[in-house]
Image (spheres, helix red, strand yellow):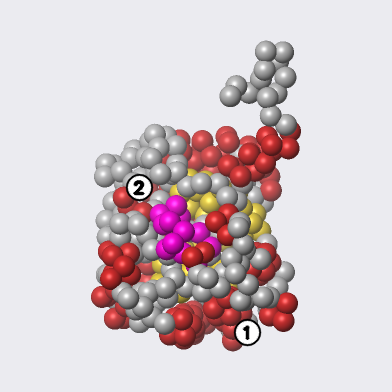
Amino acid sequence: MSEFDASGHPCESLASHVARLYDFYGQRKPMRHPKPPPTEPHFFLLRTFLGENDLLVILNTKRCQYQCAFCRLPAKSTKSWVSDADVVAQFRYVTDELRHALSIVDRVTLSNEGSVLDRRTLGAPALAEIAAGIGVMRRVRRIELETRLEFVQPDVLEELKQAAPRAKFAILTGFETVDQRIRDEVLKKREPLEMVLKGLDNVERTGAALTAYVLFKPDPQMSDHEASVEALTSIDFLARQCQSRDIDLTIRLNPMYRAEGSLWARAADRASTYSPPRLTDVMKVAENAVAAHRHVRVYVGLSDEGLANVDGTYLARKDYNSGLIKYVKQFNDRQLSKFPWDTIDVERPPSASRYEAFSGALT
C-alpha cells in the first residue's frame, strides 16, 4: 500500500505510523541478516544501558577468525577485508542517521561481531578515526570496545585515549564461564583461563574498565540449579580478579540461547534433558550477584542477536510470562536492586505476547 492516497492524505493513522516506526527503529529493532553494503554497519541502536544513553554500533568488517561452538555471528560477516575508508563511512552513516540525538549520547559501544582490536579484521587507522569522531561528542564519557582479551595492548589503548581524551575506555569481552571443561569442550572458546588473567593484567595497565559476558546455562546438559551455581561462581571469580586489580567491572548476564546451525545447538538437540534457561533463575542470580559484590554492576541481557528461534530461548519455558520483562528492565536501568518476588507470579503460564518480549539488551 502506498503512503498516500489519491488526495495526498496518509493511508495509515498517525498511531499506526508511530507504532510501526517504534517497533522497527526502537528497542525491538530487528538485527539485519543479509550482509549490508561495505559502507553500512551490521547494526546500530540508541538504547538505555544502566541508566545511560548508549549508542551500540556493530561494524561491518572481516569476520572473526574464531569459530566458537555457541556462536553464529561470523556467518553474518564477510570473508573479505573491508577498507578503512568504508569502515569509517559506516560510522558516518550512523551519525547521519542519529544526527538529532547525538547530543544525548552518554556512551558508545563498538563491536564488529568479533574483536575490534584484532587488526586482522579491523584496521587501526579506521578505529582511531572513529574514536576521534566519538571524541567530539561532548556528552560521551565512556567508549566500550568489544574484543577478546588477547588483543588488549596498552599502547593501542593509549593512542585511542588521545583521540577521545574526555572518555573512559572499557573492554567488552565474552568471559562466558569459569569452568575450563565447559570453555574447552562445550563452547570451544580456545581461551584458557591463563590467557584471561593475562588479559586482565593488560586491562589493569591501560586503566580501562571491563564489561564481561557471563552465560547462564552454557552447558546444555546442566540442570536449572547447576546453571545458577555455575553462573554465581563465574561472577564471583571475575569480581575477585577485577577487585584485586582495581578494575571497574560490569557483568552482562546472558541467558544462553540456541543459535541455529551452531555446534552448541546440535549438542542441545541431542541432550534429552536440555531445556532453555528459566528467566526467574537468571533474575535471582543477578540479584544475588549485586548483593554479594556491591562494587559490581550487573545487567541482564535478553537478546538472541537474531540467531535463534523462540524455542531456543528463555521464552520457550512454560513458567515464563511477559510480565517479568518490566522488572528486568527496571533492574537494568538501576531502578531496582532487588526484585519484588512477593508480587511476581513465577508460575503464571505464558501470555499471548510472549514472542514480543523486550529485547533491548543487545550484545
Type of the residue with mark 2? Lys
* Residue 243 shows in the view: yes
Residue plotted at (67% across, 75% down): 345
Q: Quadrant of residue 339?
A: bottom right
Image height of 283 relative to 106, above or below: below
Query: Circle 2 is placed at which residue position?
Result: 76
Distance (Cα) linking label 2 and label 1: 38 Å
Along the viewing direction, whichever of 87 and 73 lies nearer the viewer: 73
From what the image shows, is residue 150 above or below residue 352? below
Residue at position x 46%, y 81% from top?
Answer: 224
Q: Is residue 307 magenta?
A: yes
**Residue 326's disc number:** none
On residue 291, the disc is: 1
User: Residue at the spot x=28%, y=51% of the render?
Assistant: 120
Q: Position of residue 178 (x, y in %)?
A: 38, 80
Q: Which residues are magenta?
A: 302-314
What is the three-letter code of the residue carrying label 1?
Ala
